[in-house]
Amino acid sequence: MQGTMTERILAAHSGRASVSPGENIWVDVDVLMTHDVCGPGTIGIFKEQFGESAKVWDRDKVVIIPDHYIFTEDPKARRNVDILRAFVAEQGIPWYYDVDSPKYKGVCHVALPEEGHTLPGEVLFGTDSHTCTAGAFGEFATGIGNTDAAFILGTGKLWVKVPPTMRFEFEGKMPDYLMAKDLILQVIGDIGVDGATYRAMEFAGSAVSALNIEERMTLCNMVIEAGGKNGVIAPDDVTLPYIRERIARAGTRADFDIVPDNPDATFVHRKTYDVSKLEPTVAKPHSPGNKATVTEVKGTKLDRAYIGSCTGGKITDFIAAARILKGQTVKVPTFVVPATTEVAKGLWSEKIDGQPLWKIFQDSGCSIGQASCAACLGGPIDTFGRLNEPLVCISTTNRNFPGRMGHKQSQVYLASPLTVAASAITGQITNPRDYVA
């Protein structure tokens, strides 16, 4: 067995026995995803280049999910969704999760696996940089621009340069006060926001194997914050039951090829972490690479706390936050926004000591929003949770650039759901170790 996981997946999709980093190859695409922000532009280029009456290469391999600017009266945002609806009707695309309909899902990166569109060994492209989230399922998944997406719509192929692979191994038993968000912030802080530019980031080790699938998604989600091309984790007994249950329920493709881990492959960088020695971590304004331990910034006063997004809006994230918030009262406005409608249902079904998560959040003084990207990308003025003032916020999201969540002078600290919840209680950045039994 030769090559890294990324190299072997790309080789299989290029009809070759093997490929090497730096090679340019034609790759057959299994899934193309787009949403309301980039979808209209992609559709426009597709029609311009292939013709007004052109058909997509395979309607069963196109997934369209409105999720970013949807619960708004902004006319331009609403027009974007109208364009998606018209294209879906014209092309007969079955995998469209329309807002204000029973099929509505929420954030695309969490919705894709929920609906069985992320399969091991496949190639997934999406017009969103956090498409790399799906690497948690053992596939090659990465974000692309509208022009590349339009070309895929017409041909089902893309010209790709094979990335070299960096390997990060996490060993040991995870302390109760740490989450995957702490691990990936540690990595990004160590290598910098350009440390993995056009490289695959592969995650392995006993601590990664012990993570559930949602925590693995968090690791892969933020590889783009280090400049990474894609993240990937080998499928195992955690991955496969999740996938098989989802594809059986959703009726998506059931066949897939597992590409196993190959620790003996050639990596351009390799580092091992002992998770028992890591501390709760934050990224200070205004970069995901501006790393600090919570201890170093403890006491920083906050105006707002936010728990949501593709990075921190999964049911695992809310269970973690609720563990901290149960029986407590928040001191700053705290927003809880589930990534998808399925996660939103989990706020009712999942319980801690017999109490549903939604009740814990409500009793602690949190505001619960509709499933969507919401404030993560700022958005129109009437978007839920948007920072319309120059506030200091601690958030489970993935980016803290100036203006990312709204106001250009806001300061956003990125942290795990545990750290955000603990900080919401005190109104200042607080170590979750103070609240985790």
Image (cartoon, helix red, strand yellow):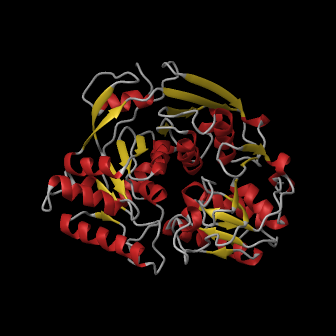
The residue at the point 54 percent across, 64 percent down is 339
- Is residue 122 shown to the viewer in this render? yes
What is the quadrant of the N terminus in the image? top left
Q: In which quarter of the view is residue 51 placed?
A: bottom left
Give the side of residue 116 with respect to residue 201, left or right. Answer: left
What is the quadrant of the C terminus in the image? bottom right
| Residue 100 point in image, percent of width and height | 40, 78
The residue at the point 48 percent across, 62 percent down is 107
Report how many numbered discs are placed on residues in the image: 0
Give the side of residue 12 with respect to residue 435, left or right. Answer: left
406 vs 384, nearest the viewer: 406
Give the side of residue 354 with respect to residue 25, left or right. Answer: right
The residue at the point 55 percent across, 68 percent down is 374
Q: Up-down: is 296 above or below 197?
A: below
Q: Up-down: is 119 above or below 271?
A: below
| Residue 98 point in image, percent of width and height | 36, 71
Q: Up-down: is 61 above or below 233?
A: below
233 vs 184, nearest the viewer: 184
| Residue 383 point in image, percent of width and height | 55, 74
| Residue 49 point in image, percent of width and height | 19, 52
- Is residue 251 shown to the viewer in this render? no
The residue at the point 49 percent across, 48 percent down is 133
